[in-house]
Amino acid sequence: MRANWLCGRFCVQASSFENYIAEKPFTDRFVQQSQWLAEGNEHPLIQSSVFHYEFEFIHPFADGNGRMGRLWQTLILSQWNPIFLNIPVESLIYQNQKAYYDALQASTDRSDSAPFIEFILQMILDAILSSDASDQDTAQASVQVSDQVKRLIQNMEQKEYSLTELMALLDLSHRATFQKNYLTPALQAGVIERTLPDKPKSPKQKYKLKN
């Protein structure tokens, strides 16, 4: 076994399995790889990427090696930081399959895991940025919905209202907009309820504050 070095803003020793003899059993190689993972001092982002690459290099199965390697990386990262359970690294790699396989091939051609590590780290960064943007959009939407629902219930009294009467409370005339931005979110939030819950589209349907 020889070691390659990935240098940039940091330098890490990346364990390499390229020169294992062909007849060495997969279980032996996997055990040694797992021992390196357990005993290594590299950052988990690097460790998980190296483990991922070496798993693909060993290629133990006829099919499914890529998915299994990505699953292992997600497991390693989530043990380090649970946030990785909710970061869609797998989906981003799936969307960039050609680049993924190109990075694998580049590392194999160079007998150096650096190209693959760099690719994976970029995918992780993209996944984090994507997740952050999604969370911000969701938070902004929640604030908007909350304000609208709050406005609705503040204008309601303890009595029953038809849809038209609720719209009149807020001086709104567009039914679809009212239902989308006010009525449906308020029902989903459980702050108001239907008087005929089993007949949501009944012409006799009315709404009231939930006790």
Image (cartoon, helix red, strand yellow):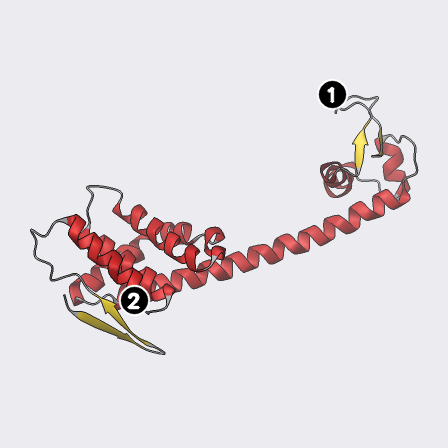
Residue 136 lies, with reference to residue 202, above or below; the image says below
Q: Residues within 10 Å of mark 1 (few under 14, many from 20)?
A: few
**Quadrant of the image occupied by residue 110:** bottom left
Classify residue 61 as left or right of residue 190.
Answer: left
In terms of depth relative to the viewer, which is nearer, 136 or 37?
A: 37
Where the N terminus falls, by quadrant? bottom left
| Residue 116 or residue 20, whichever sits in front | 20
For the image, the number of numbered tags is 2
Residue, disc 2: 40
Query: Residue 30, position in %: x, y?
Result: 21, 53
Q: Which mark is residue 113?
A: none
Q: Residue at x 75, y 37 (%)?
A: 190
Is residue 62 visible from the viewing direction of this image?
yes
Q: Position of residue 115 (x, y in %)?
A: 27, 66
Does 39 sit above or below residue 178? below
Identity of the residue drawn at 92% across and 32% down: 159
Q: Position of residue 109 (x, y in %)?
A: 16, 64
Whether residue 5 sits left or right of residue 208 in the image: it is left
Residue ID at (27%, 43%): 64
Q: Amino acid at mark 1?
A: Asp
> Which residue in the structure is indicated by mark 1?
198
Q: Secondary structure at mark 1?
A: loop
Q: Quadrant of the C terminus?
A: top right
Closer to us: mark 1 or mark 2? 2
Which residue is drawn at the image coordinates 45% and 61% (left, top)? 126
Q: Is residue 205 left or right of residue 81?
A: right
Could you tell me if residue 102 is visible in this image?
Answer: no
Label 1 or label 2, whichever comes before in sequence order: 2
- Give the image quarter of residue 127: bottom left
Q: Give the CA distance from mark 1 to mark 2.
A: 61 Å
Badge 2 amino acid: Gly
Q: Looking at the picture, how far across and down is residue 39, in whole percent?
A: 29, 64
